[in-house]
Amino acid sequence: MARSPSSEPFDRDRLPPGVEPVADTDPRTLGPYTVVGRIGAGGMGAVYAGIAEDGRRSALKVVHPHFALDPEFLARFGREIDLVSRVDASCTPDFHGADLSAATPWLATEYVPGPTLRGHVREKGALSGGMLMAVAVGLAEALRAIHAAGVVHRDLKPGNVIMSPEGPKVLDFGIARALEGTALTSTGGIIGTPGWMAPEQYEGTEASPSSDMFSWAALVYFAATGREPFGRGAVDVVSHRTRNEPPDPTGLPEEVLGPVRAGLGPDPARRPTAAQALDELTRRWSRTQVGAGAQEPAHEATVVIAVEWSGVEVPEPRKVRRRRRGPVLLPAAASLLLVLALIGSWSLLAPGSDGPDGDAADEEENVPAVESAPEDAVAVAREAVALARGAASFESAYFMSGTEMGDPPWQEFAYTEDPEPVYWQSDLGGPALVEIIEIGEGPDDVVRNSRMRNEGAEDAFYRDPADEAYDTRRELWEDRLVQITEVVDQAREVTYGGVTEVGAAESAVEHETVDERSAGSAGHHYTGSLPSSIEEGESDEHFFHLWVGEDGYPQLLHTHENWTVEGAQGAFENRTNEYVLFEQFGEPVSLALPDEAEIADGPPNTGL
């Protein structure tokens, strides 16, 4: 049986994990809503937590003022409002209202807590029995309502399904279109997410209810097996598999095997409609229940979910704690993936097309830009940096290799908010090691450790409120983060290579640390050429490789440059490789803190 939340998802004093208190620059009201928190932000707008005058809680999507002046963008936002308002189903977020003519146009929908389908499967494994049937039925019910309203979703995938405490919810109508209308999207690009699209879509055929049902079958396959039906890889590879290689049915339970096989068929005309799939599944389920057979299929979806749904819980909201330093732009909590999907849909309005699937918070994932518009490298890079800045925990490292490097720098970073905020930074260069530990939020809580790196050197922790490190202690971490957007902005061209193994690319220079710490991980891969950074002369080659996870967080940035220097003894080739390795976000971090007795009142005389 579904578990109902014990309290409202948020109020003025308590917000879900990842939702930040409003900043001075945020609106205080939107229509009848009081804005109580910032859920996330994207390049074209933001999403807020709002409480209406009648007490209703909503996710409020708004448009940045300068985009509100753009007639084409406003038309896109109006189209989204129209499509969301048309659909009425138990397995889609409720439409709460909108105002396209307001100074800050806004759209209010039901706030849906919970992980995405991908995040749920990753954490708890493939679904089976009643939960699998509830997901299959719930998604079919949602599509039946969507198609009955004259809408095609066009981007159904694990990151666009929220596993709420009440049941599955299909979200993100950012690239949906009306059957009777035309899509306001750039021409020449794929609309959808490779790996979840129907085969005819790769050939340029417009999305239809039949292509949505292909995506439905792929989703049920994923939920039942934990496997992506057509794997991962470059777009052309996934496209070939989708059109020529039926997925392995091993692991598909008998109760969903027939509808899933039919839905994954290559002929759109032979796929079941959403109503037909819903009818078959609910009838199969009804035969296993006493007295359930009299229900109409359209109504029985809610019956199936009410009986079978279990095991989905979301974190309780926590008391608001306002921070002194920069705001969190995007949440890492899985319960906020609904609004990340809303944000992610905006990135499709910029030039570029869709690419391989990922998640937020596909797990935390979400529908970040890397899912909704992976070929838009600028949007993906900016969102990756914003997510990293707002993470509740992280571990990262920066290191270099190359010719004549001597002792190359080695920097490590870690942060956690459990049980209290602690930021740790280690900067190793030459003979010195300098650590900075920030405990809490004030200057009195910054501890430094400066010592020589030679064997046997003792730690020298000290607290110095006047130390300039209070203002610059995170500057090094920020430097590493902004390298991501800098290389993408400076690149002469950027190529999107689909989902590949992190660190493995034809021109990438391997490093044992990358191999050890990211072994087996995969991410969306971007590469591009960069201008020469050599003060005198030109580099022979200068390029970068960037991997971004399916949840939108950065994984690895690698830049390589080599150049030739002419000298009296001939030409010498030089090269440098820089690596920023983002090991994890959102996972537990253990940091060893010095005892109070170990911390001196001022810096020691270490000779540094």
Image: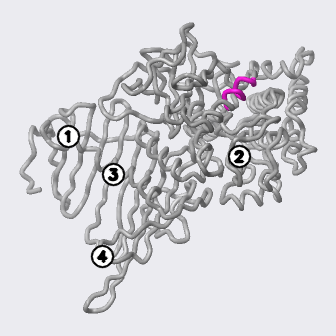
**Quadrant assignment, res 494:** bottom right
How far is the residue under mark 4 from the one under mark 2?
46 Å
**Quadrant assignment, res 143:** top right
Horizontal arrangement in the rendering, residue 533 relative to residue 285 (left or right): left
Query: Residue 232: x, y in percent?
Result: 67, 55
Q: Which residue is mark 4?
A: 536
- Residue type at the position of mark 1: Val
- Can residue 41 be seen here? The reply is yes
The residue tagged with tag 3: helix, strand or loop?
Answer: helix
How far is the residue under mark 1 from the one under mark 3?
21 Å
Which range is magenta? 80-87
Q: Residues within 10 Å of mark 2 (few under 14, many from 20)?
A: many
Q: Which residue is mark 2?
A: 192
The label shown at residue 447 is 1
**Quadrant assignment, res 408:** bottom left
Horizontal arrangement in the rendering, residue 261 relative to residue 384 (left or right): right
How far is the residue under mark 3 from the one under mark 2?
34 Å
Count of marks, rendered view: 4
Q: Residues within 10 Å of mark 4 (few under 14, many from 20)?
A: few
Rendered residue at 77%/60% (across/down)? 240
The residue tagged with tag 2: helix, strand or loop?
Answer: loop
Horizontal arrangement in the rendering, residue 57 relative to residue 578 (left or right): right
- Residue type at the position of mark 4: Glu
How far is the residue under mark 1 from the one under mark 2?
49 Å
- Residue type at the position of mark 2: Gly
Query: Residue 243: x, y in percent?
Result: 82, 57
Rendered residue at 8%/57% (across/down)? 607
Q: Is residue 84 magenta?
A: yes
Q: Which residue is mark 3?
A: 479
